[in-house]
Image (tube, rainbow, N blue to C red):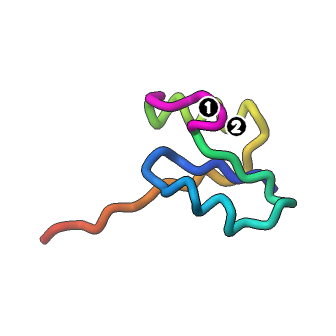
Amino acid sequence: MRVLLDESVPRRLSAEFPDSFGTRTVQQMDWAGCSNGELLRLAADHGFDVPCAKVLPTVT
């Protein structure tokens, strides 16, 4: 399984995944600043199984 951490996710979180997950950050892949749609396409094209982004709480 390969995991891609979005720019909104703290980079240090990558250390919490087992090495077997092949976890990378958007910055490590040199994809910082890409739109969400472009990131999803790049992730799929490069064999990532799980894109992970920080979900912000909804203000009501």
Q: Where is residue 59 drawn, in percent x and y?
A: 16, 67
**Which is more toward the observer, 48 or 18?**
18
- Distance from disc 2 to disc 1, alpha carbons, whole Å, reads 5 Å
**Which is more toward the observer, 52 or 19?**
19
- Which quarter of the picture shows residue 12? bottom right
- Which quarter of the picture shows residue 57? bottom left
Q: Where is residue 9 drawn, in percent x and y?
A: 48, 55
**Which residue is depicted at the point 58% across and 50% down?**
5
**Which residue is depicted at the point 44% across and 29% down?**
33
Image quarter (top left, top right, bottom left or bottom right) of the C terminus: bottom left
Count of numbered marks = 2
Dominant secondary structure, magenta: loop
Circle 1 sits on which residue?
Answer: 41
**Crowding near pointer 2: few (<14 within 10 Å), some, many (20+)?**
few
Q: Where is residue 4 drawn, in percent x and y?
A: 64, 48
Q: Is residue 8 above or below residue 26?
A: below
